[in-house]
Image (tube, rainbow, N blue to C red):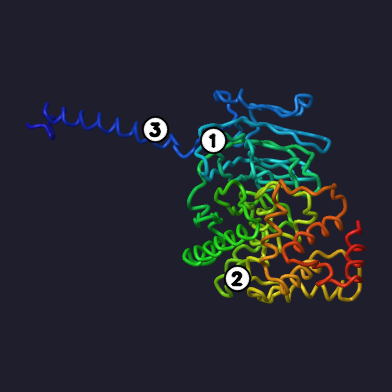
Amino acid sequence: MKPLFAIRPKTLKVKALLLAFLSIFLLLTTQCVKKDDSKIFYEDFSSDTEQIAKWKINEEEFKDNFSLLTDGGVDNSGCYKITNTERGELYISQVVENLEPGTLYRMKAKIKTENVEEGRGAILTVNMENSNQIWNASKFIHGTNDWQEVYIDFIANETGKAELCCRLGFHGGTTNGGTAKGTAWFDDVILEKTPADQIQVFEGEHVRFMVDVDKKSISDEEIQSWVTKLDLIYKSYEKLIGGVPYQGKKLDILTTPGVEKGYWALAGNPILWNNNVKIAESLEKYRDNDDWSFGILHEIGHVFSVGTAMGCNYWNWNDEIFANFRMSYAIEDCGGTVSQRDVLYKGRDIIDYYKIFYDETLGQKIAKNNGDALHYTFLRIKEKYGWEVYEKAFKKLYDCNNMPEKELKTSYEKLLYFLSHVSEAAGEDVVITCYTPEEMKLIEQSLAEK
């Protein structure tokens, strides 16, 4: 009787070879699954992680407030615990190197909290030498919460180094001091290039806009058109001031979760645009009304302030006034449009917006410190003499070789010093030709307000 089946030697060799190839394939596939090339840095605080010893604490005198735990983390793995009964700023950090300058990176981690109060709570931040991103942070976590993932996006600088920080409290807070108390646990710290499906980048000649994908409510072509308009604004500010910020490096605008409530955006490089405000609505206003965004133009105006552009700020007492004043110049110069109080103002018409505040204060002979009212008086000078007087005045004011003979102590002294340069450019005293003596007394009284 013939057997039901027979294995020939040749067939056996072929099958053995196939099994060998299959084993190799499965091994390689398994290794590929385990290896994640997108992670530049990963820390799960497990006992077999060589880099644990590289984590540093910032306050040696509070070393008992820091604990490396062998369990209690995500999936009962190890984790790091920071606790503080008083408001403070405690953090662990580790430096990573060889990052690509100008590239957008994301640090993320899982955080659990118990009774965290005050300031910025439990957060992630990234320190870099000569950073212009000092306020940047992850979402702030307060109260008692189970494990949740938070992130911070940042742009690597020319050193290629960045210090990754897991914090309880942060001195860089713009409100409430930033410091916090309570207990926070940190686990699964990851550094990677920011995924393209999370943030989309739009490049202009001078401005780069990086926006959360879920906030992108208009087409790519429409956003690129807006960035082109911001390039025009940038060039206009340069024409007015006579210099550019950050040695001419491209100016970045980055949407971020790490800005306190009440702050629409924060100036710097990048400009941090709070992604808890109506970013999508702002973009739609551009699409529907050609609204270039008062808020973003204001922040770019701050970036062009002295200290970033030319280096001298002895005369500038209130950059909230001058950020908007630069914007008034640029809007008229570029034929741009912005909206305030649901009214669109195009080009020169922006003067009508600032007249509202003049009419409510100085126009009523009320000595109230209102920067928008004072802004209107500067625009009156422009109406009489043209923008050229300001182009000349700013260039001289920002010249560090042109220092005043005496120290300017009060806001009113700084105002008069500013107007003296405008008068020099106009060829006559603008205080006499554009203000009444009564107005100047009211302005002096208002600027003396605390």
Is 28 positioned to the left or the right of 392 in the image? left
Q: Mark 3: which amino acid?
A: Gln
Closer to the observer: label 3 or label 2? 2
Mark toward the start of the polypeptide (2 vs 1)? 1
Q: Mark 1: which amino acid?
A: Gly
- How many other residues sit within 10 Å of disc 2, few (<14), some (14-19) or many (≥20)? many
Q: Is residue 356 above or below residue 232?
A: below
Mark toward the start of the polypeptide (3 vs 2)? 3
Residue at position x 64%, y 60% from top? 240
Q: CA distance from mark 2 to mark 1?
A: 38 Å
> Which disc, if any, is residue 336?
2
Mark toward the start of the polypeptide (3 vs 1)? 3
Quarter of the image with the N terminus in it:
top left
Q: CA distance from mark 3 to mark 1?
A: 29 Å
Foreground residue among 119 and 395 = 395
Is 392 positioned to the left or the right of 283 in the image? right
Residue holding disc 1: 160
